[in-house]
Amino acid sequence: MPEGTILAHVGRTLTLAHALSSLQVEIRFAASGEHAERISRSGWPVAPVHTRSRKELFDQMARKGNAFTREQLEEYVEDERRVLGEIRPDIVIGDFRPSLCISAVSMRIPYVSVVNAVWTSHCAVRFAPPLTMPLTKIFGQTLLEIVQPYLEGSLYRYFARPFNVVRRKYGLPGFSDIRDAMCSEDLTLMPDVPEFLPLDEATKPKHYRYVGPIFWEPDVEMPEWIDALDRNRPIVYITMGSTGPLDQIRTLARILAARGLQVVCTTATHTPGDIPEGVFTAPYAPGAEMCAIADVVVCHGGNGTIYQALSQGRPIVGVATFHDQEFNMQRVEALGLGKGVCGMPSDLASRVDQAVHAPAGQELPGQGDGVPAADAGVGCGV
């Protein structure tokens, strides 16, 4: 049961389904939203389940910093219980459906959560307050960093309140931390590597398991214009996932093309429209292959894209729009694997120039300070 409005979560569960199909188990999906049709096109049975539109979900996260009100959560839980009652699964796997920590658990169905390590309360990395969070916009990052040790626990408890109200309705104990609602008390699978997002080994539960990046690729060939690229000139790959607004993609492409760079980009569900000369677009393309032909990957800081870029040894320039993407980019910067961009256009252009001209294996300028010894060998050429 993925969140069907976000392609990354649909893609990860599709990849899991293909892997699990070798175990001779019956697999069914429950999903609705913009990307749910990809599941049925892959041949899996799909039951509809209550899901908000992508715009409604993202607007809520941008305004309030959390994904659910109590009323919204109750709607999710009630409909999930309906679907689970009809299908009667032996196990349910959820990806960005934290409501399953109520619906599945209240029906005593073993629940597996797929969630990145950054969203667990056992993550060993301390992150700066994200600039995209409403509180940071109001009070500023510097002030929040000062009060963060005192405020953080209260915020996690506050965001857990809707879950606790609904969990008590079904006779379940509450959480002291919203991040615990993202995980499962049965089995939590983290599509990460510990070198990038480590957990605190002293507190990590035994049922939290690293499974490595879960890559999903669309079933499409590389675009025909690939052969027209000049491999003697720098190539920049732009991908903002299914969440990146088209205006942002178009702006990024214009800035970089104006500097004489070859720009290739994927636009997901968007229609490109007015694209400047020197920019090559496609709705979808194999991500790892696109990273392989590029000198630099410009992305939104999504977990899957970051791992694709690193798998091909490409430096990353991140333009994050949500706080989980900012957390990923903070980690990328700490390891000297790339750089986040706070403003445009000069920041973007300078970061891409630095990445294009950085020798393989060398950290980008201004990065790597304070990286623990275990991480010190990681660089752009890895």
Image (cartoon, rainbow, N blue to C red):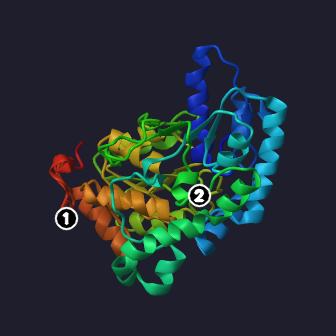
Task: Name the amino acid type tagged 2.
Answer: Thr
Residue drawn at x 66%, y 69% is 59
Q: Is residue 154 above or below residue 5?
A: below
Residue 163 visible to an observer of this rendering: yes
Residue drawn at x 61%, y 58% is 272
Residue 356: % across, % down: 26, 56
* Residue that mark 1 sits on: 365
Residue 50 visible to an observer of this rendering: no
Residue drawn at x 33%, y 57% is 125
Task: Name the amino acid type tagged 1.
Answer: Pro
Using residue 26 as the reference point, say whether residue 241 is left or right of it: left
Residue 140: % across, % down: 42, 84
Q: Residues within 10 Å of mark 2 (few under 14, many from 20)?
A: many
The residues tagged by marks 1 and 2 sit, at their Cα atoms, a distance apart of 29 Å
Using residue 199 as the reference point, say whether residue 323 is left or right of it: right
* Residue that mark 2 sits on: 243
Q: Nearer the viewer, residue 316 or 373?
A: 373
Q: Is residue 218 above or below residue 67?
A: above
Q: The C terminus is located in which quarter? A: top left
Mark 1–mark 2 contact, CB under 8 Å? no
Residue 262: % across, % down: 39, 55
Which element type, helix, strand or loop, lies under badge 1? loop
Q: Nearer the viewer, residue 308 or 49?
A: 49
Q: The N terminus is located in which quarter? A: top right
Q: First in sequence, mark 1 or 2: give its number.
A: 2
Q: Quadrant of residue 18?
A: top right
Which disc number belongs to residue 48?
none
Q: Is residue 243 above or below residue 25?
A: below
Q: Nearer the viewer, residue 100 or 306?
A: 100
Which element type, helix, strand or loop, lies under badge 2? loop
Using residue 30 as the reference point, say whether residue 287 is left or right of it: left
